[in-house]
Image (spheres, helix red, strand yellow):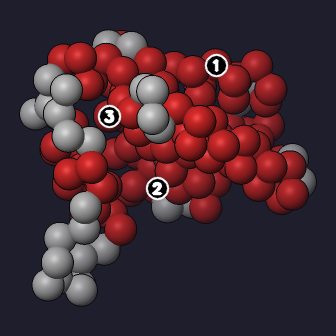
Amino acid sequence: MVNLVRLFQRQRGDPARTEFDEIKRLLRCLKSSPAQTRSGVGAGICLANSDFVRRFAGLQTFRHISTPDRQRFCSDLSDLELSLRNEEPGMALGVGLYRIWLTEAVAGRHEAAELLGKELTELSRNG
């Protein structure tokens, strides 16, 4: 399995790098990772999405719930991510990417949400 720590390391010496650039870099690394890693990430995405759909049915419903309820769900995803990190690091990464996508989508950062949404859909097919 690919060393997932490498995926989270920020590039040193380039303070102008944006979060969007970091997301793109992470996705490039995932594309070149072994099938087993991509499968684990996909499984994590499916797990997070299943919980999301079960609770909220869709993004529009999620946008209309209270901010504390949205924050609570994102916190639940973070807790799930942390609980998976030691045993299933690929799944943990998938849950974390799903949480980032959800945050970007709700915040209206369309470029990042669209890129992540497309990639998460592709990765979830492998999960």
Q: Residue at x 36, y 30 (%)?
A: 90
User: Quadrant of the rendered structure where residue 61 is?
Assistant: top right
Relative horizontal placement of residue 81, taking residue 42 as reference (left or right): right
Indicate the secondary structure of the residue bearing disc 1.
helix
Whether residues under marks 1 and 3 lie with C-beta atoms below 8 angstroms apart, the answer is no
For discs 1 and 3, the disc positioned in front in the rendered view: 1
The numbered mark, 1 or 2, whose residue comes first in the sequence reads 1
Looking at the picture, how far across and down is residue 112, in whole percent?
39, 55
Q: Where the C terminus falls, by quadrant?
A: top left
Task: Give the mark nearest the N terminus, 1 or 3.
Answer: 1
Residue drawn at x 80%, y 49% as measured from the top left: 72
| Quarter of the figure with residue 66 | bottom right
Under mark 1, the amino acid is Ser
Which numbered dot is residue 50?
A: 1
Query: In the image, what residue type sits under mark 2?
Result: His
Q: Name the residue under label 2.
A: 110
Of tags 3 and 2, which is closer to the observer? 3
Disc 1: CA contacts within 10 A as few (<14), some (14-19) or many (>=20): few
> Picture coordinates of residue 59 (x, y %)?
68, 37
Between the C-alphas of marks 1 and 3, the distance is 17 Å
Is residue 15 in sight in this rendering? yes
Q: Residues within 10 Å of mark 3 (few under 14, many from 20)?
A: some
- Asked if disc 3 and disc 2 are in contact, CB closer than 8 Å, the reply is no
User: Disc 3 versus disc 2: distance between alpha carbons?
Assistant: 14 Å
Q: Determine whether the residue tagged by mark 3 lies in a helix, strand or loop.
A: helix
> Hey, which residue is sitting farthest front in the picture?
86
